[in-house]
Image (cartoon, rainbow, N blue to C red):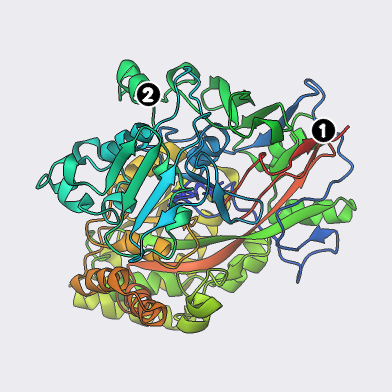
Amino acid sequence: MKKSNMKRKVFAVLLAGIMMASMAACNSNTDTNSNSNSNSNSNNQSSSVTNDNSNTETVNNYPGTADDAEMVTVDLRAEPKDINSILCQDAAGSDVLRLCMAGLMKLDGNDKPVPDLAEDYPTVSEDGKTYTFKIRQDAKWTNGEPVTANDFVFAYKTIMTKEVASVYGFIMYENILNGQEFYDGTVDESELGVKALDEYTLEVTFVNPLPYAEHLFSFSTYLPVNQKAYEEIGPDLYAKDADKIVTNGPYKITEWVHDDHITFEKNDDYVDAANIEVPKVKFLMMKDANARMNALKGGQIDCINLTGEQIEQLAKENQTTTSYFDNGNWYLQFNTTRKGLDNPKVRRALGMAIDNQALCDSVLKDGSVPATGLVPPTIAGANDKKYAEAVGTILQSDTAGAKALLEEGLAEAGMTVADLKLTYMTDDTSNAQKTAAYFQQEWKKNLGIEVEITPMPFKSRLNAMNEGNFDIVMAGWAPDYNDAMTYLDMFMTTNPNNSGRYKSETYDQLIVEARQEVDPVARQEKLVQAEKLLVAEDTAVYPLYFSRVTYANSQKITGMTRSGFQEFDFADGAKIAK
């Protein structure tokens, strides 16, 4: 998802977006390190930083919030763009949905899909395409109605309706049988590969076998929606306020003060309510890094993500922090329709001009590492190996050669350096603007060009990206599932997340062939070819770094799950310390 300059699901979700907001369980098309993925690395940080990639955290000397003994308060960093699962595209929205919604499957504390509303794991057909679920008959919505198979059919059908304009609709209509045809209006819903066989039996048929299918059933776009509530409230108002959404998950939303906080209380009707031990959760939306640190020390918050400077500060104070690779990538996204940026050499030169090692070491200072391609090295590949082992190093920074390449590209475009007028769009958070200033400096020093910086709120930036109203933006992506496809299919010509309007028939065909390929090694080779075309040849995007999150929390909370697929989860053993 898109991540925000905070970071799973557009995250824009920083999710993301913020997954990371532009990074969203989603996608995370967002600005770099705004507030979400402040990351840290044991190689250059104090030993007070815990660097196991586990989902459990250590504690420090901060006592935690005292105003409500039953509540844990954490920093979400940004207002979610949308918490309607039909429309959700950012990591912040996905974080909210993880607390208040339940689907067929969920991720456990080790990021493995396990049954949630499903009675058991699905029955899978011999050809690997059809999944049949039995839904628990004790599952309820907060309006008192039972959760049924029709709630999934309604949600899936709505998401795949073109007029609804779900940015994440592609993850469904491109995978589900006749989904594309339904989206295009050439078949009706009776031919869709989603059927309620009876009130509590759901059948989902995919076009091709999907190695990550069970992950999809735990993803926010595959959640059910209560049809009665959706239609009574109306699509335009649904999920816009706390009293305009009906949920079925571990928590209920009890208060939503926009751009400030969202409060949750335990849902006693949730199917696994007996194992939810944190009675209340509050998400704050704090844009300023210094304000977050003051809030932690002052007992107004229980968990914050840290900047590089804050990691160093806490190390000097002998406070413990926890870090993990969040599977996030951060890259320059170019609007390929703009004059000058329609040339791949110009785009590549803008990326090459940035010293991404210095970016990681001197600006981020949080353990992030220079990107070698688009897909992070943590993602699974064929035959129980990492995908990165197959793709290798696709690109490296080359500040010395960037200017000559820029001039060559501009000559091909019939332009000079003086003709190139560019704007860099960024989030309005303190960290995002700090990174933007570094880029501006590098472009001036290594290319001799002035790039204007335009900061804006996360939601506004996502809207501008969706509309293609930008020149250059720092985007981040939080994976929706553990497979390279989640990073690559969004750059297909017709994908709504293709904000830069990249078009390549060859690229599209490689992704289609990878979807159809059953052999895992042959499938992976198609994805590798696609990534090299996207990044090294066409340079529709220029990857800069792979991110790592470092955070600090008070003594009040233990057992909270934080990982590359679950930024916050309180359903896997989280407790309030006594």
Amino acid tagged 1: Gly
Rounded to the nearest angstrom, the CA distance separating label 2 from label 1 is 34 Å
Q: What element carries label 2?
A: loop
Q: Residue at x 33, y 63 (%)?
A: 489
Give the answer, above or below, for where 3 lies relative to 444: above
Q: Identify residue for label 2.
A: 238
Residue 64: give its label. Answer: 1
Quadrant position of residue 127: bottom left
For label 2, the crowd category at 10 Å Cα-Cα, with few meaning under 14, some 14 to 19 and many 20 or more, is many
Decide which of 528, 434 is in the foreground and name it: 528
The disc, 2 or 1, on the residue closer to the chain's N-terminal end is: 1
Q: Position of residue 48 (x, y in %)?
A: 85, 59
Q: Which residue is drawn at 70% across and 36% down?
A: 275
Q: What element carries label 1?
A: loop
Amino acid tagged 2: Tyr
Decide which of 27, 155 is in the foreground and name it: 155
Decide which of 77, 419 is in the foreground and name it: 77
Asked if labels 1 and 2 touch by Cβ distance under 8 angstroms, the answer is no
Q: Where is residue 92 in the image (x, y as percent from the top left)?
A: 52, 40
Q: Where is residue 169 in the image (x, y as percent from the top left)?
A: 30, 46
